[in-house]
Amino acid sequence: MIVFSGQVILLDVEGTTSSIDFVHDILFGYAKEHVAAFLQEHSHDPKVYEIAQTLAQETGLDADIRNSSGCTQVVLATIDLMNKDVKSTPLKALQGIIWKTGFQSGQLVAHVFDDVPPSLASWATSGIDIRIYSSGSIEAQKLFFGHTAAGDLTQHLRGHYDTTTGPKREQESYSKIANDIGVKPEHILFLSDIGAELDAARASGMNTGATIRPGNQPFESHYDHEQINSFTDVTF
């Protein structure tokens, strides 16, 4: 049980609001299945081209998606990054654009744990400022919470952060988020399933809680973070 008297709850997504299996099997699977056709079809779109070239440079490729061989190299690099679950900013941006079609068409419907929708609604009604900090792009986050099995949950969210703010395992990223929100870190509760992320948030001065969800990896951290099995374990 976590007793929180602050103003802001900052949430991770994978392993916290949604299952790891959904993200890795369904979302990553959809992106892997569609990335080749997507890059071929949108190779001359300036936004897609810029993301793909940044991804190529990040992975050490001298490749251009506007030609067949270059596109193939970028596709293979993209799939390899997903297989390794690398938290790459251009990868996450590309995934978000690909997922947009899936969510808008109804092929993708985001999984959230049963306690998440009522808890978000209750927290928001109580005046809590709820925000998301995920390695997934901000665009992907908005699509995800806008197309869940429980409906559109974006009405409860006041802000989003991704790796353009900074890596999730670095203290400075959490300091930047607190500064952006305009509150002291001690008024923020960060919930995640990853010990290194919680350690970084705690080092910045935030309150922290470890989410223990079905399918999550064994929890390891330097600090003693309160553990919860459900968002209903957070009280005010």
Image: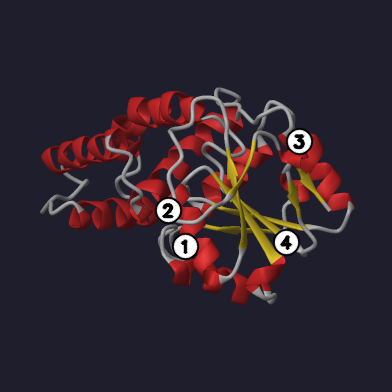
Q: Secondary structure at mark 1?
A: helix
Type of amino acid under label 1: Ala
Q: Which mark is residue 105?
A: none
| Residue 92, above or below 216 | below
Residue type at numbered disc 3: Pro
Secondary structure of residue under mark 3: helix
User: Which label sits in the foreground, 4 or 3?
Assistant: 4
* Most foreground residue, 36 or 191: 191
User: Of callouts 4 and 2, which one flags the residue occurring earlier in the amino acid sequence?
Assistant: 4
Q: Which residue position holds label 4? A: 8
Residue 200 - label: 1
Q: Amino acid at mark 4?
A: Val
Question: Can you give x and y, in whole percent of width and height, for residue 199 in the image?
Answer: 48, 58
Q: CA distance from mark 4 to mark 1?
A: 17 Å
Q: What amino acid is found at the position of numbered circle 2 in the picture?
A: Ala
Q: Give yes or no for contact between labels 2 and 1 (Cβ–Cβ under 8 Å).
A: yes
Q: Earlier in the sequence, mark 2 or mark 3?
A: 3
Element at label 4:
strand
Question: In the displayed structure, would residue 134 be above or below residue 29?
Answer: below
Q: Disc 4 vs disc 1: Cβ atoms closer than 8 Å? A: no
In front: mark 2 or mark 3? 2
| Marks 1 and 3, the one that precedes in the sequence | 3
Q: Which residue is mark 2?
A: 196
| 154, 63: nearer the viewer | 154
Q: Residue at x 36, y 50 (%)?
A: 48
Residue positioned most to the right? 125
Label 1 to label 3: alpha-carbon separation: 27 Å
Q: Are the residues flagged by discs 4 and 3 in contact, CB closer than 8 Å?
A: no
Residue underneath mark 3: 117
Mark 4 crowd level (few <14, some 14–19, many ≥20, 10 Å Cα) = many
Question: Measured from the top left, where is residue 26 in percent x and y?
Answer: 46, 24
Residue found farthest to the front: 224
